[in-house]
Amino acid sequence: MSLAERNKRIKKQYGGDDEKAVSDEEEDPDRPKTTVKDALRQFWILAMPYFRENREGRCLFLVLIVITLGTSAVHVYFSYLIRDFYTALTKKHVAEFYRCFFKFLGSMVVLIPVQVSFRYMYTKLGIAWRKWLTERVLTLYFSNKVFYGLERQAKSAEGGARDYMERNKEVDNPDQRIQEDVSSFTGFSLSFFLTVIRTTLDLVSFSAILFSIMPELFIAIIVFAAVGTGATVLVGKVLIRLHYESLQREADFRFSLVRIRENAESIAFYGGEPVEERFTMQKFQRTIENSTLLNVANRNLDVVTELYNHLTHCLPTLVLANQYFNGIIEYGVIAQVRGAFGHILSDLSIIIHQFNGIASFMAGIDRLFLFMKAIQNLDPD
């Protein structure tokens, strides 16, 4: 847009009623919900093209899975090593104690390079995936003047309330969706998927260990984790909507500041500072209101997760204490059970520990998917 066109547009804006330049953005309590099924479908549509078309991505992902398998096997080995280590310590078997200690050192020589390689390959895959997806989105964005069509849609809705309920009607802030939403999508997708694989392997391995020692404790942990997960989902489900609106409102506020910078000369010439200040403050107020609601929702979620985490510290020891006092089991078994208990509970509690991130991720998927859908509608070819 030329300077003359900007001047004409701003003159028209400031020539009318100031109150019309700033809309009263009201909240609607009746909002649609993004279901887990919708999020999974959107994720599949967005993620699969990269691994289907890119050989390097498939190879890197396969290497990460192999490393995850090896790491899980080492953790199982460590659980038995820790059992023998503490049993030798409590029985004062010096030779056995140092034998276990040197085994532990030898295992670390293998484990540390594997873990370093995992982080390196994980980051490399994340960078490659983001590069591929961003380049693909930019190609679509600039083809057949799609960027212009999205801008016209945004202008037609300019000044209106664009909240979670309105997310299907127009695409706001394409710059944020290309830069921030793509980055968070590739980063969290990779992290969460590998976490699911690791937790599944750990769950199978350590469940066998715990069930062989004490079946009752294994059943109790399943029930405990199910109750904790249900409470977390019930309390924290509002975070999905709040994270979606946080992304949108922060982007709107940032864009209002960019708009002032781009039109600084015209705003100063026509004396539009009061309207621009009021408009920008209104956008900022919306971000603060949503941040306050996010803080309250996070506080409620923290009550559940902190209570859950503290109860897990003493539960396995409390259950096994009488058997240890009666000489039925050795202290090394308690140490092994605590380790297995911790692994299993962590695996079963993946939703509890990562619910906030999952909620933010679902909001990001929704925004990115709707952006790609809008591009497709403007350029079906």
Image (tube, helix red, strand yellow):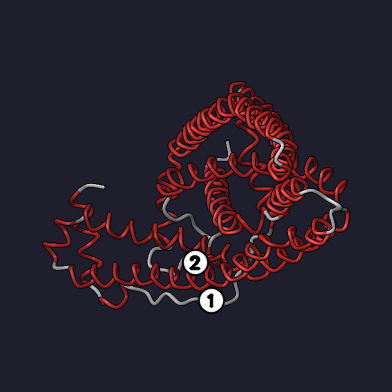
Residue nearer the viewer, 136 or 343: 343
For label 2, the residue is: 163
Disc 2 to disc 1: CB gap under 8 Å: yes
Q: Give the left or right position of residue 370, taking residue 13 as reference.
A: right
Using the rendered view, name the quadrant where residue 11 is placed: bottom left
Report x, y in % for residue 308: 66, 65
Q: Is residue 241 visible?
A: yes
Report x, y in % for residue 292: 44, 72
Report x, y in % for residue 100: 68, 31
Q: Give the left or right position of residue 152, taking residue 362 as reference.
A: left
For label 1, the residue is: 28
Query: Residue at image x 68%, y 69%?
Result: 234
SS at badge 1: loop
Query: Residue at image x 52%, y 49%?
Result: 371
SS at badge 2: loop
Residue nearer the viewer, 20 or 227: 227
Q: Give the left or right position of residue 302, taking residue 286 as reference.
A: right
The amino acid beneath tag 2 is: Asp
